[in-house]
Image: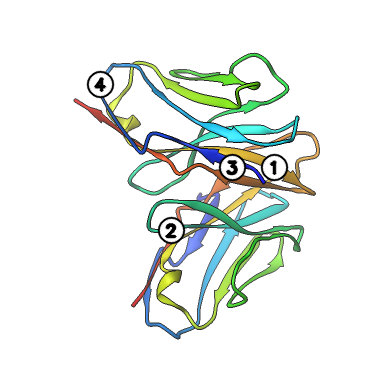
Amino acid sequence: DTAVSQTPKYLVTQMGNDKSIKCEQNLGHDTMYWYKQDSKKFLKIMFSYNNKELIINETVPNRFSPKSPDKAHLNLHINSLELGDSAVYFCASSQDLYRGPDTIYFGEGSWLTVV
Amino acid sequence: AQTVTQSQPEMSVQEAETVTLSCTYDTSENNYYLFWYKQPPSRQMILVIRQEAYKQQNATENRFSVNFQKAAKSFSLKISDSQLGDTAMYFCAFMKRIQGAQKLVFGQGTRLTINP
């Protein structure tokens, strides 16, 4: 079974459209993340939720809105897509870590292409 | 703000050789964690090794080991007896804890090719 699963894996869409990427983890983790990897392979965090509460919200356009219906799911909705949104989006999860760092488990990525 | 720098965009070695990937970082924190992640062509992000800053002993995981120099803020990855399957992008990352979450700050990556 896949620990962190994302859908869709590939998405091609036109500028101006609204799209969502879904993420689910079956590891029982408390914290989930969205990372963006751009065309130069640079990875940067976008959001993090802990037990459905927004913890990290980096400088991301308002067109990006994460939603966490429960701690096993963290979806990413993007409004009015732009060419610069083309990237690979990674979902990840980790356990609540006051006792020390645990492994962050990444999904396989969702490759978004805006044309 | 923390920054992570990988100064080698690409490296290439022959199979079975040893290769070292460089990473430097900048932080004012005293307690933190450092990671190396591997990203093969499949795009999956795979944790290779991690190091706690409060530990002086360098972390090792089979053929992978690190040289952690805290004062110099250097965290290099050594791959011994390199294998074709080691071909991938390698990312160095600094971890900052924010409440119950971990924020990973990544370097630019090093593309490593192992040649037969």
- Identify which residue is drawn at 43% across, 70% down: A84
Q: Earlier in the sequence, mark 3 or mark 1?
A: 3
The type of residue carrying mark 3 is Thr
Residue B115, image x, y percentages = 21, 28
User: Looking at the picture, does residue B27 appear above or below residue B55?
Assistant: below
| Labels 4 & 3 near each other (Cβ < 8 A) | no
Q: Earlier in the sequence, mark 1 or mark 4?
A: 4
In depth, the one of B113 and A92 nearer the eye is: B113
Say which quarter of the image contains residue A14: bottom left
The type of residue carrying mark 2 is Asp
Mark 4 vs mark 3: tell me if same chain: yes
Q: Which residue lies under the disc numbered 3?
A: B3
Secondary structure at numbered mark 4: loop
Mark 4 vs mark 2: tell me if same chain: no
Foreground disc of the pair 4, 3: 3
| Labels 1 & 4 near each other (Cβ < 8 A) | no
| Labels 2 & 3 near each other (Cβ < 8 A) | no
Q: Which residue lies under the disc numbered 1?
A: B96
Q: Earlier in the sequence, mark 4 or mark 3?
A: 3
- Identify which residue is drawn at 34% across, 17% down: B18
Residue A101, image x, y percentages = 70, 36
How far is the residue under mark 4 from the one under mark 2?
Answer: 30 Å
Q: Which residue lies under the disc numbered 4?
A: B15
| Labels 3 & 1 near each other (Cβ < 8 A) | no
User: Looking at the picture, does residue B26 appear above or below residue B17?
Assistant: below
Indicate the chain on which mark 4 is placed: B
The type of residue carrying mark 1 is Lys
Q: Which residue lies under the disc numbered 2?
A: A38
